[in-house]
Image (cartoon, rainbow, N blue to C red):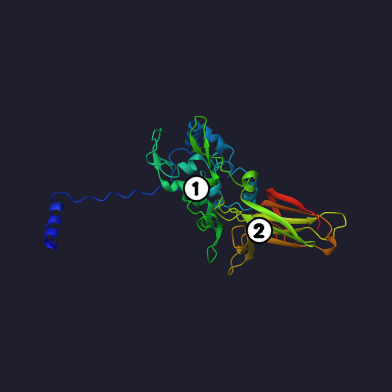
């Protein structure tokens, strides 16, 4: 067909209304994030409706860290030290971050926080061909099944005015750089469980750092004494199970690796190493001091496996050595160095004893 014929055909199609109009591109759903965006109705009553209909899932959520995001003693203690609206935005997303209403703040990260971030349609990750029977509008978006659903509250920069923004939490970019960026956060933190009627749903208990058995599956520890005066501990992250550095999340989470010679005649003092994001204080220009990253030696960052060597006094060569790996939640550092930490909780993950050689 000649160019002129093509032009005539196009004109005829336009005249007859035969030109196909492109289908409108669906507007992406708003993902959950800090502070309410456009809450329809009262958050507490709307959340109560969720709980009343989805009682099994609600029972899981009631015992979760999301539910206790605002009311937990750890957060309340940290908030007294730094009463910032920025912090309340994620920990009490249904309340006014400047003047939080007690009832709304106590909801923590609620059903409506994730499933009703904007508008009146309940956000769902179930595919479009899933059963649609529901007493409310449903908005289905595959992004809600991916890391995008968690990113707004699990990766962010410091809320100050430093010249170059610096990340306070980096979990999402850690996930993208991991060996399994295609797996979702929910695959690990919301495994599928069976309900009483036999349906398979995502658990809303949100498995995390308070679960001892779950944390122990993140890595293995091998301890050896290659020489009478030397101890080596090798920590190997299970990269097929953990899609980010370990520990991740809050900037002050850390692993404490310690060794101690046993016996009253020991000469070697107990020793500790910390695997964490290590911070230093800087004062940019004439502004207030800020915490900035010095170095990062968490599992999954750099050397793998991480091998730590401890040297003993030769006089202790005939004495056994106890070793331990502990996960700690640190609220603040008091005094110089990382030994002066205000620890608010943690878990003893691995321990053992190496006999004398």
Position of residue 223 measured from the top left corner of the image (x, y, whole percent):
72, 55
Q: Is residue 182 left or right of residue 230?
A: left
Of badges 2 and 1, nearer the viewer stands: 2
Position of residue 275 measured from the top left corner of the image (x, y, whole percent):
66, 58
Q: Is residue 228 left or right of residue 36?
A: right
The image's mark for residue 184 is: none
Position of residue 312 measured from the top left corner of the image (x, y, whole percent):
79, 62
The image's mark for residue 275 is: 2
Q: Is residue 232 above or below residue 37?
A: below
Instruction: Tell me the quadrant of the picture where the C terminus can be found.
Output: bottom right
10 Å crowding of disc 1: few (<14), some (14-19), many (20+): many
Q: Residue furthest right?
A: 265
Between 69 and 6, the one lying in front of the other is: 6
10 Å crowding of disc 2: few (<14), some (14-19), many (20+): some
Q: Is residue 252 visible to us here?
A: no
Asked if labels 1 and 2 touch by Cβ distance under 8 angstroms, the answer is no
Q: Is residue 354 left or right of residue 148?
A: right
Where disc 2 sits, the SS reads strand
Position of residue 91 measured from the top left corner of the image (x, y, whole percent):
56, 47
The image quarter in which residue 291 lies: bottom right
Q: Which residue is mark 1?
A: 35
């Amino acid at each position: 067909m000649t160019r002129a014929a093509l032009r005539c055909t196009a004109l005829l199609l336009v005249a007859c209304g035969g030109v196909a109009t492109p289908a409108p591109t669906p507007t992406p759903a708003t993902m959950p994030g800090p502070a309410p965006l456009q809450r329809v109705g009262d958050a507490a009553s709307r959340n109560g409706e969720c709980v009343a209909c989805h009682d099994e899932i609600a029972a899981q959520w009631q015992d979760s860290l999301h539910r206790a995001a605002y009311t937990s003693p750890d957060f309340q203690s940290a908030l007294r030290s730094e009463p910032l609206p920025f912090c309340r935005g994620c920990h009490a997303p249904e309340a006014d971050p400047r003047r939080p209403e007690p009832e709304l703040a106590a909801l923590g990260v609620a059903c409506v926080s994730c499933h009703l971030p904007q508008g009146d349609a309940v956000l769902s990750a179930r595919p479009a061909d899933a059963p649609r029977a529901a007493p409310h509008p449903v908005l289905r978006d595959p992004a809600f099944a991916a890391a995008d659903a968690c990113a707004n509250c699990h990766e962010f920069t410091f809320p100050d005015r430093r010249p170059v923004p610096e990340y306070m939490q980096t979990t999402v970019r850690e996930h993208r750089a991991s060996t399994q960026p295609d797996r979702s956060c929910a695959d690990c933190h919301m495994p599928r469980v069976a309900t009483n009627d036999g349906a398979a749903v995502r658990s809303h208990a949100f498995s995390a750092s308070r679960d001892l058995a779950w944390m122990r599956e993140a890595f293995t520890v091998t301890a050896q004494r290659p020489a009478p005066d030397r101890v080596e501990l090798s920590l190997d992250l299970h990269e097929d199970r953990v899609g980010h550095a370990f520990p991740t999340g809050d900037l002050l989470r850390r692993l404490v690796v310690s060794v101690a010679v046993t016996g009253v005649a020991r000469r070697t003092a107990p020793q500790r190493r910390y695997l964490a994001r290590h911070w230093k204080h800087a004062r940019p220009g004439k502004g207030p001091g800020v915490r900035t990253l010095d170095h990062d030696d968490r599992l999954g960052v750099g050397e793998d496996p991480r091998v730590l060597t401890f040297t003993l006094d030769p006089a202790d060569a005939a004495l056994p050595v106890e070793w331990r790996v502990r996960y700690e939640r640190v609220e603040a550092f008091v005094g110089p160095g990382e030994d002066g930490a205000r620890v608010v909780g943690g878990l003893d993950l691995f321990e053992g004893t190496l006999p004398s050689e």
